[in-house]
Image (cartoon, rainbow, N blue to C red):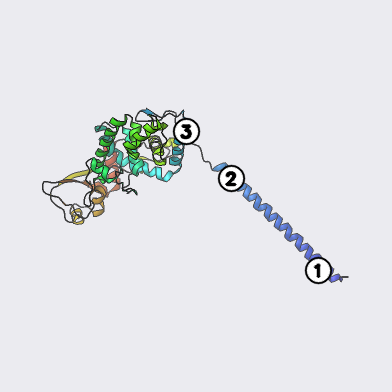
Amino acid sequence: MPSASWKILISFVFLFGLLGMSRLFNYSAKIKTNDDLYQKYFNDNYKIFAVNVPDDLNFAGEKVPLQDFEVRERIDREFLVNTYWQSSTLLLAKRSNRWFPVIAPILKRNNIPEDFKYLAVVESGFLHGISPKGAAGYWQFIPSTAKAYGLRVDDDIDERYHVEKSTEAACKYFNDSYKQLGSWTLVAAAFNMGVSGVQKQLIRQQVSSYYDLLLNEETARYVFRILAMKEILSNPRRYGFVFRKKDLYPKIQTTKVKIDTTIKNLPSFAESQGLNYKLLKYFNPWIRTDELKVGANESFTISLPHESVKDYDLLMRMANAEMGEPAIPSTETDSL
């Protein structure tokens, strides 16, 4: 039989074991309680809302058939993606405020519906990227199409990066496409897929509307992305975007200068104009090298920014005075 001292030791071990188990259970209960409180706080305070799809969407005056469930679900997808990819959409609003005032008048002059300005948003986001297929510029022309519509594309000059000239070329494309397709919505789709590609699918599938076509993923989403961007940029607060006029990138006034002799060193030329090379190329990205070669009986027009470009406050004042209301509706209120 165990001695009295052993009995006492065993009793202490048993008691300490019970105490340890008790603390463990209490700790587990406390953790569970904290997790429950955290989950309740999360559920009470963090919300992700579905987005209302307007009932009267249209592109260039052509009504979107939202009674078609498949059409409604596709537009719903683009509203959700562009509403909740907040940083991207907010940047597009900022950039659009600078470039819409350049693009919209050219569209109007060529009798193109203003909604086509949103194609540039979707095509490039107003960034001069190059696609895997070699498309470039705000309108993302491939070289062959650019040349067919009068743009120069070579190692020295690439007018796909010339905002005004490439927009004029896009207008010619849109007008030519409309003559063949008879629908602005189909024209928009054709800008992504090509006119012949759209015509082929219309004939093969025996339909006449973009919304009835079964297309590749990119073109199937293309017009819906345009519709979503049009609606969100036109009514930003409705989709949770809050910004002031001063948050949008201003249009920058430029002076057009005719150049009829070769400029061999553009960095030096920029310095002579009170600029740096970076700014010269920002406003003239179509010049692809460090020199501007001018042939006989040839000339170019380059854009030089107003001196306000060096003072952001002055730049904003000048832009507001010139433009009046911003190209993108601001959501500025007295409470901000």
Number of the label disc, if any, that sits on residue 271: none
Between the C-alphas of marks 2 and 3, the distance is 37 Å
Residue at disc 1, secondary structure? helix
Q: Is residue 60 above or below residue 22?
A: above
Residue at disc 2, secondary structure? helix
Q: Residue at x 67, y 52 (%)?
A: 30
Number of the label disc, if any, that sits on residue 41: 2
Q: Which residue is mark 1?
A: 9
Question: Residue 326's x, y, as percent?
Answer: 32, 37
Tell me if residue 13 can be seen: yes
Q: Which residue is mark 3?
A: 70
Answer whether labels 1 and 3 touch (C-beta < 8 Å): no
Which residue occupies the foreground of this view, 284 or 246?
Answer: 284
Between the C-alphas of marks 1 and 2, the distance is 48 Å
Question: Residue 140's x, y, as percent?
Answer: 31, 44
Q: N-terminal of the two: label 1 or label 3? A: 1
